[in-house]
Image: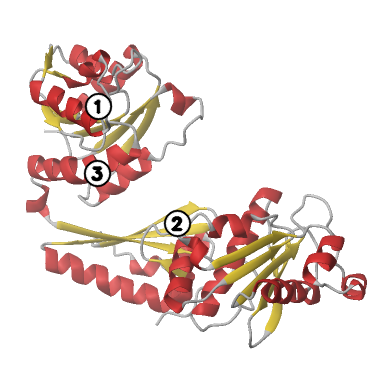
Amino acid sequence: MKPHGAWVLTIGDELLRGEIVDSNKSFLSQQLLELDLHTGRHVTVADHAEEISTQLRAAAQHVRVLLISGGLGPTRDDITTEVVAATFGRPLVRDPGAVEAIKRYFDRLGREMSENNAKQADFPEGAEVLPNPNGTAPGFMLDVEDTLIFCMPGVPAELYPMMQEQVMPRISQKLGISDGGIVRAQLLRTFGFGESVLDRDLADLSRDDGSVELGFRVQFPDNLLRVIARGADEAQAERRLQSTLVELRKRLGPAIVAESEERMEAVLGRMLLEQKRTVAVAESCTGGLVGHLLTEVSGSSAYFLEGIAVYSNAAKMRELAVPSDLLEQHGAVSEPVAEQMARGVRERTGADYGIATTGVAGPGGGTDDKPVGTLCLGFSSAERAEARTYRMLADRARNKQLAAHIALDSLRRELLGLGLPDETFPRATKLPEKA
């Protein structure tokens, strides 16, 4: 009997050419962790029969579970099903129910199904069909040589629900995982502390017996922290998870942006809606990136009034009433100018909050007192206007991205009643003392 373990195989020429970012591997591995199954290998191969077959044979020798995404479409280069069947000596069998499901999908769209779509209803003999109500390509499960092979479409909108609703229960049932203990997991999105600081200062929360583990993943400029708790039953696993989360909330405080995958801009948007507040932004060094992030959220027109990129001094004076003597005395990258930019954009628009960014993104333009990575952040409300200076250490693209997130995070903290943070970035080189 092979040990419980899993590999993930993603298929497609477009993945290897870099035309599509392959997020399926990370999603599938995260889902497997919910069942306490660790992914031992990630492999991406082209739409090439021999390369796919090589990976199939290797998986059948080493692991109990192989998850495959991609290559189930109707075109000639979609060959995953045919290769699986040929590799394990199974003839292809057309499933009438799958054909009808594909036809119904096209009917709902008001389109006629072309003949080549029918090949998506062909499966290796003995396979269990996994319906796909979100697309035209059903998946399938094949139990061969003591390995469970799951083939799923590569489109995330189709893959994700199929994995969660159909594949996960089958893995649990087939491997009897529920009899060996329960796993609970929670993802935290954090901003402000470096990955190495999180790993070092939270290490004591992981237990040597494996009942609680912490995992870290960088999603610049955020750091994702996953808590995994195990127990003999559901209640024990949940207690361990919740007690660890309580301690993490004490130590990290507002550095926790969300207890989910939810991104900073979505969290901030929800807070603005809940508090019925509006914001306008004036950007120099970020060049419109703060406004872009805010408008990535559906419904942002309810709270985002205006964004203006004022890169030159002339634009700052013309659009935001920044006095020329202020620019001459302090320079464009300064707290007085950032404060006036925030005040100017708030008064211009009537927003509840004005946020402004001015800085040195790099690689040139830095000085001894204002080196590359300097960010002056301005804030304005009806009650006050102020500014802070932060230091970032990255290349131009990442400095801009980080500056935009600092701006969003500062407003988030303001809405939490904390005011603008005084620390530079990262927020600290050490987490607060253990609670």
Quarter holding the N terminus?
A: top left
- The residue that label 1 is drawn on is 59
Mark 3: which secondary structure? helix
Mark 1 or mark 3, earlier in chain = 1
- The residue that label 2 is drawn on is 298
Q: Position of residue 204 (x, y in %)?
A: 37, 69
Quarter holding the C terminus?
A: bottom left
Residue 171 in view here? yes
Look at label 1 and name its amino acid: Ala
Look at label 3 and name its amino acid: Pro
Return the residue found at the far front. 110
Q: Position of residue 414 (x, y in %)?
A: 55, 79
256 sits to left or right of 366: left
- The residue that label 3 is drawn on is 161
Closer to viewer: mark 2 or mark 1: 2
Q: Is residue 375 above or below residue 296?
A: below
In the image, 6 versus 109, the foreground residue is 109
Look at label 2 and name its amino acid: Ser
Pointers 2 and 3 in contact (CB under 8 A)?
no
Residue 406 in view here? no
The answer to which quarter of the image holds residue 351 is: bottom right
